[in-house]
């Protein structure tokens, strides 16, 4: 029976290893000190006096210390906002958007490991980042005076100021731990603004409303780094837009007394669902598909920066960015990826084509220092930059159990593959997820290692080929979608599984570590140590999502050579953020 204890040759070694603080090059007294309350004094064995330091601020070494630590005041603002709000009803969300969001979250909810019998019994409460982001972003803007049938006041300065406020670009950054519900944290305010804009044109007149509705524009653009994420975010918005609801249950006293709002929500095109026109422009879609989609007003378009930038190459098409130029709301999801040195030129190139943009939202699970520097350089006006960050940013969720396996020790004697095989065997036999197909995600650093590792697990360690899938960027989007399907759905019961699997293993790289919602996956194995803490956060974050539990095994060998990694499990337990 595999146990981590067996990874270590002797009891002494195991006792040593269990004081992980020491292995992280942190002295025993420091470990003791960090357990004490800040300010207390302790005596070391050599009689030295050590003032117990408060908990270490952050944990990082070398490449693992490139994260920007947000100001404590930003976290306190979020903390105060979060503690007073425990339901979506207390947040400023357009009624039909709130109804659609709650229905969509319920529809996707993984009931396994819950005591809830049916989705109707679920009580959906906002996550911390959703409270903080919706409060900050969904502030009403002054309406553009030119649109309202009012004679401009004779205070010219006031009119110009209101016009500027109505159109002024505001840049928001949303940063929160992986799996904390960031997608709805930006969708709820953005979809509410689309609905409020519709209500504003409806309030002017039916003609104005129809004119806006029949305009050939794109209103909101959501940029993500991969085609899998295009699919995931598109499906989320599409489901929300079509899910039926009875919005009358969502209206509060004041709203029920608002004749314009109630008549707007009773319209045929508003009463039963959000009824937004949601589009995706993804792998293999030609630009003509985008232009065809824009023949009708597109409320939300989900795509990648590369697809939009590709419009610049269209020499024989007049004004190829004409639809992009109309965008008023833009979200850059997985911004820590889309704004790193290899992507930022393409991402910012898209932003430059949106002169009418009013809200630009950067959303990510980490704030790399490079990202923070780029933001400050590109948007120097501090008043336009509004940060939303949760107190748990850069912390690995405590419900994730992180274990280090040393391949140097017997019986592995330096073979990480043998270590992996043994870990998969142990996971398969450990009695967890009874009755369900277990799914394990194995991350390697290099694309070239994916297929060989998958083959080794099949041919050398006897796994069935149906149970091992290798996914890399060299495969086309359809093949990747087919292979990923069983990992992106909730766990299947063994008797219902078409492949008759008991355990299924996905071998992949960081391509799939960003943002993908691997529903209910309980085990992640890192065959290689990620190159940066950003990659570590994203890989680890494929499990333990939205307060669920999960396990992460990091396999190390003498080449890994970073003794501090052995201190990571303790750091996670103590809720210390990565630096
Ligand atoms: N308020 C909520 N209550 C319960 N579940 C929620 C809530 N909001 C979102 N979810 C669910 O939580 C899961 C994770 O949400 P989401 O993918 O937005 O996380 P994330 O923070 O974007 O993760 P990552 O950083 O990895 O991109 C999804 O399945 C979503 O349906």
Image: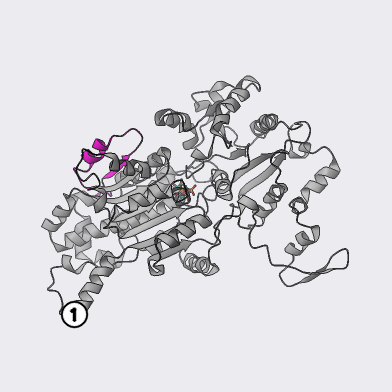
**Residue drawn at (76%, 50%) of the image:** 23
Rendered-image quadrant of the N terminus: top right
Quick one: 378 or 179, which is closer to the camera?
Answer: 378
Compared across the picture, whether 467 is left or right of 404 comes to left
Residue 366 highlighted magenta (yes or no): no
Q: Residue furthest right?
A: 46
Compared across the picture, whether 333 is left or right of 552 comes to left
Q: Position of residue 342 (x, y in %)?
A: 46, 46
Disc 1 secondary structure class = loop
**Residue drawn at (29%, 54%) of the image:** 354
Q: Position of residue 114 (x, y in %)?
A: 53, 45
Residue 289 highlighted magenta (yes or no): yes
Quick one: label 1, few (<14), some, or many (20+) residues within 10 Å? Answer: few
Q: Residue furthest front?
A: 315
Quickly name the residue at label 1. Answer: 155
| Pointer 1 residue Cβ closer than 8 Å to ligand 1 | no
Q: Position of residue 489 (x, y in %)?
A: 46, 36
**Residue drawn at (54%, 59%) of the image:** 68
Quadrant position of residue 94: bottom left
Q: Residue furthest bottom?
A: 155
Compared across the picture, whether 28 is left or right of 174 comes to right
User: So how many labels did they put on this image?
Assistant: 1
Q: Position of residue 221 (x, y in %)?
A: 32, 49
In the image, residue 17 sits, relative to residue 45, either above or below, namely above
Compared across the picture, whether 135 is left or right of 471 comes to left
Q: Is residue 469 visible?
A: yes
Quick one: 476 or 459, which is closer to the camera?
Answer: 476
Rendered-image quadrant of the C terminus: bottom right
Q: Is residue 367 visible?
A: no
Quick one: 202 or 566, which is closer to the camera?
Answer: 566
Give the extent of the magenta segment: 272-297
């Amino acid at each position: 029976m595999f146990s981590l204890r067996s990874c270590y040759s002797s009891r002494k070694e195991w006792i040593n290893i269990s004081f992980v603080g020491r292995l992280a090059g942190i002295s025993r007294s420091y470990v003791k000190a960090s357990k004490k309350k800040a300010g207390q004094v302790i005596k070391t064995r050599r009689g030295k006096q050590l003032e117990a330091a408060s908990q270490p601020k952050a944990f990082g070494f070398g490449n693992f210390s490139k994260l920007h630590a947000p100001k404590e005041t930003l976290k306190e603002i979020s903390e105060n906002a979060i503690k007073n709000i425990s339901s979506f009803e207390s947040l400023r969300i357009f009624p039909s958007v709130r109804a659609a969001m709650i229905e969509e979250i319920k529809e996707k909810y993984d009931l396994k490991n819950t005591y809830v019998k049916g989705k109707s019994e679920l009580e959906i409460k906002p996550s911390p980042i959703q409270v903080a982001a919706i409060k900050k972003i969904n502030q009403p803007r002054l309406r553009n005076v030119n649109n309202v049938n009012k004679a401009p006041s004779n205070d010219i300065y006031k009119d110009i100021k209101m016009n500027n406020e109505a159109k002024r670009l505001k840049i928001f950054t949303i940063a929160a731990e992986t799996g904390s519900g960031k997608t709805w944290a930006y969708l709820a305010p953005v979809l509410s603004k689309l609905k409020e804009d519709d209500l504003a044109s409806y309030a002017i007149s039916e003609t104005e409303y129809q004119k806006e509705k029949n305009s050939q524009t794109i209103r909101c653009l959501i940029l993500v780094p991969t085609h899998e994420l295009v699919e995931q975010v598109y499906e989320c918005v599409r489901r929300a837009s079509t899910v039926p609801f009875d919005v009358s249950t969502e209206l509060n006293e004041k709203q029920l007394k608002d004749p314009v709002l109630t008549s707007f929500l009773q319209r045929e095109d508003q009463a039963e669902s959000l009824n937004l026109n949601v589009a995706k422009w993804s792998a293999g879609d030609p630009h003509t598909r985008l232009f065809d989609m824009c023949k009708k007003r597109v409320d939300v378009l989900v795509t990648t920066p590369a697809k939009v930038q590709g419009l610049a190459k269209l020499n024989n098409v007049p004004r190829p960015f004409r639809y992009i130029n109309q965008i008023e709301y833009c979200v850059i999801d997985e911004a820590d990826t889309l704004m790193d040195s290899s992507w930022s030129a393409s991402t910012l190139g898209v932003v430059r084509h949106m002169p009418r943009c009013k809200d630009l939202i950067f959303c990510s699970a980490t704030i790399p220092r490079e990202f923070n520097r780029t933001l400050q350089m590109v948007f120097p006006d501090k008043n336009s930059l509004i940060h939303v960050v949760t107190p748990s940013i850069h912390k690995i969720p405590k419900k994730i159990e992180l274990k280090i396996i040393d391949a140097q020790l017997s019986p592995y004697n330096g073979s990480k593959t043998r270590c992996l095989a043994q870990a998969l065997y142990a996971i398969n036999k450990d009695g967890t997820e009874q009755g369900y197909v277990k799914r394990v995600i194995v991350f390697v650093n290099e694309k070239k290692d994916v297929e060989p590792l998958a083959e080794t697990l099949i041919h050398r360690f006897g796994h069935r080929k149906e149970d091992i899938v290798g996914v890399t960027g060299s495969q086309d989007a359809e093949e990747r979608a087919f292979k990923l399907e069983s990992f992106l759905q909730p766990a299947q019961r063994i008797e219902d599984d078409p492949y008759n699997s008991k355990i299924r293993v996905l071998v992949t790289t960081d391509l799939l570590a960003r943002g993908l919602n691997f529903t209910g996956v309980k085990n992640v194995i890192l065959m290689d140590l990620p190159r940066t803490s950003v990659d570590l956060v994203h890989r680890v974050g494929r499990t333990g999502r939205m307060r669920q539990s999960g396990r992460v095994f990091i396999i190390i060998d003498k080449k890994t050579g970073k003794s501090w990694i052995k201190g990571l499990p303790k750091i996670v337990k103590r809720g210390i953020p990565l630096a």
